[in-house]
Amino acid sequence: MISVPDQMGGVPCIRGLRIPVATIISLIADGMTNDQILKHYPDLENEDIRKALHFASLAVKERELPLVIS
């Protein structure tokens, strides 16, 4: 995934295309299949969808936060 400040407001996009990762994740969440997504976005490949899912999983991965006692 690539974030380019002057492209698409700097949001992460797939392979430098103007297709945000969030768009693909939303389509999957809405129930679209990979084949439907690929038909709608012919520049995409199956690997792009897999990488978008992987990117999203890393973005929301549980992190250990330090305990702050006040």
Image (cartoon, helix red, strand yellow):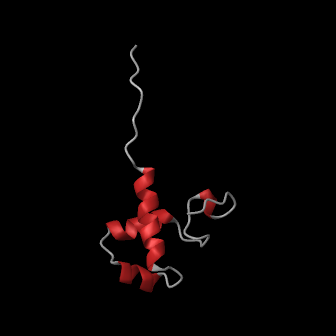
Compared with residue 36, is residue 52 higher up or lower down, i.e. above or below? above
Where residue 31 appears, x then y in whole percent?
Answer: 30, 72
What is the quadrant of the N terminus in the image? bottom right
**Residue sitting nearer the eye, 57 or 7:** 57
For image coordinates 37% across by 43% down, the residue present is 62
Residue 4: name its quadrant.
bottom right
Instruction: Determine the residue located farthest toward the left in the rendered image.
Output: 31
Compared with residue 50, is residue 41 higher up or lower down, i.e. above or below? below
Residue 46 in the figure: left or right of residue 5: left
Where residue 39 appears, x then y in whole percent?
Answer: 43, 86
What is the quadrant of the C terminus in the image? top left
For image coordinates 33% across by 76% down, the residue present is 32
For image coordinates 56% across by 60% down, the residue present is 12
Compared with residue 4, is residue 37 higher up or lower down, i.e. above or below? below
Where residue 18 appears, x then y in whole percent?
Answer: 59, 71
Residue 26 in the figure: left or right of residue 13: left
For image coordinates 69% across by 60% down, the residue present is 6
